[in-house]
Amino acid sequence: MKSRKLIIKVLLAIALLIMALNLSCLTLTAGGYHTVGVEPDGTVVAVGRNDEGQCNVGGWTDIEAVFAGMYHTVGVKEGGTVVAVGRNDDGQCNVGSWTNLAWVAAGGWHTVGVKEDGTVLAVGKNDYGQCDVDGWTDIEAVAAGGAHTVGLKNGYTVVAVGRNDDGQCDVDSWTNIVGGAAGFSHTVGVKEDGTVVAVGLNDEGQCNVGGWTDITQVAAGFGHTVGLKSDGTVVAVGRNDEGQCNVGGWTNIEFVAAGGWHTVGYKPDGTVVAVGDNSHGQCEVDDWILAIYDPSPDLTISSTAGGLVTTPGEGTFEYDAGEVVNLVAIEYSGYKFDKWTGDVETVADVDAAETTITMNGNYEITANFKESNGDCGCFIATAAYGTPMAEEIQILREFRDEYLLTNPLGQALTDLYYRVSPPIAEFITEHPSLKPIVRAGLLPVVAMSALAVNTTPVEKIAIICLLALLPVATTVLMARRRNRGPQYT
């Protein structure tokens, strides 16, 4: 039971990242009568009603997320700027000046954005005060309904403004909320334990979610509510005259979005399924392959000849989406760092050996080194043996790669060595008489390294036992000498 609860909490955390209080998902969204998706190359595809230009997204590029309102579509570009198309009679598409946006929601006739500092912006129709969000702070995500706006605070409580004649804004008492959605006249919240709460208009049963469990994400349409369960299946309640709730057979779904009268689901391979109203072709998504969102992207690191990456190391590592990872590259003697190459669009400084990368996807990067053309850049061992090709240095490198770089303490020691070595190595190079002394000092280290890398586990144990017996044998011999006493003849 405990492990099951832990799994649910992990899935809920992922759901907060990819859905959080919103009608839409990062790469898939459903509007009133249209459906929009982000393709792997950052372009956008849309189907459905287009009388207001809400599907005119063919020229969009570098899009990371899309959000659809009743008759308009909003896209968030790399870097947090925003674009919008569609109906704009109330200014709901006037988002061109927005920057540093972390999240967006598109409602009936208004648009809301969360900035990286937790404050909120809003444009569009404000007849019910749905855009009165200027004083909101500490907001992690927002949802926009027909004429109301809901915000999830970083303490897992909820705030709301706008039309409330059906009680859709009565969320002040909600706690432990980790995700949710805003429908046309109702609001739904996912609690930390996987249960669901809902307020607002319930004429079609869209708020009858009290018995739902193991829910990781919800979506809300005009009169229906959809829930994604932790096992990838889907449940739905509410209006079903167009079949928008016929999701009982769906499996392996990663997230869902609810349009006005249709429902769409995103699968891990980027394919999309849809049910409900298709009068404008909004469900014709069978051939879509959308960008794949990975909440735990991989970073694969390698290096060219002449150096290595000490932080986080070399190989493949898994991180949380959006995590900032430190990178440290160290050059060998006779080489110097050149630049990072590969998937470097989120590397802070590709020309710096010490920099960071932001994990917005699966990346493969390489640390490149080039010959230093006579610059020293030496390390102690290289200076002592006179050449980086010495057999002793090769043994030390193998020990470093097999034993030191495979654990945090070893990585720290390696990093420290590479930091303090150059000035000491330069001093040794300037005073050749020191080389034999340093080599003598390195001999035990080289011997132990050779022992570690060139022997089998059984041989290692045998040698360690022999070494352990040496002090015992020495002690016994000394004791015997003392017991004999002086011998006279």
Image (cartoon, grey):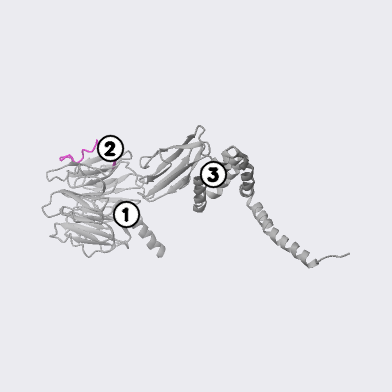
**Amino acid identity at mark 2:** Thr
Q: Which residue is mark 3?
A: 424
Q: How would you classify the magenta stretch by its main secondary structure? A: loop
Q: How far apart are labels 1 and 3 at the CA level? A: 52 Å
Give whichever of 405, 229 is nearer the camera.
Answer: 405
Kindly give the residue lying farthest to the top in the view shown.
Answer: 373
Give whichever of 483, 389 is nearer the camera.
Answer: 483
Left or right, 1 with reference to 80 = right
Q: Is residue 44 visible?
A: yes
Looking at the image, do the residues carrying marks 2 and 3 touch, with CB atoms under 8 Å apart? no
Give the mark nearest the N terminus, 1 or 3: 1
Q: Which residue is mark 1?
A: 15
Q: Residue at x 25, y 42 (%)?
A: 284
**Quadrant housing the N terminus:** bottom left
Left or right, 214 with reference to 410 = left
- In front of the other: label 2 or label 3? 3
Give whichever of 233, 311 is nearer the camera.
Answer: 311
Give the mark nearest the N terminus, 2 or 3: 2
Q: In terms of secondary structure, where does tag 3 sit?
A: helix
Q: How far apart are labels 2 and 3 at the CA level? A: 52 Å
Q: Which residue is mark 2?
A: 61
Specify start and end residues of the magenta stretch as a single range.
Answer: 49-63
Looking at the image, do the residues carrying marks 1 and 2 touch, with CB atoms under 8 Å apart? no
From the top left corner, tell me how far across and down residue 173 is, in percent: 22, 65
Q: Residue at x 47, y 41 (%)?
A: 302
Q: Residue at x 25, y 37 (%)?
A: 60
- In front of the other: label 1 or label 3? 3
**Amino acid identity at mark 1:** Ala
From the top left corner, tell me how far across and down residue 300 is, in percent: 44, 43
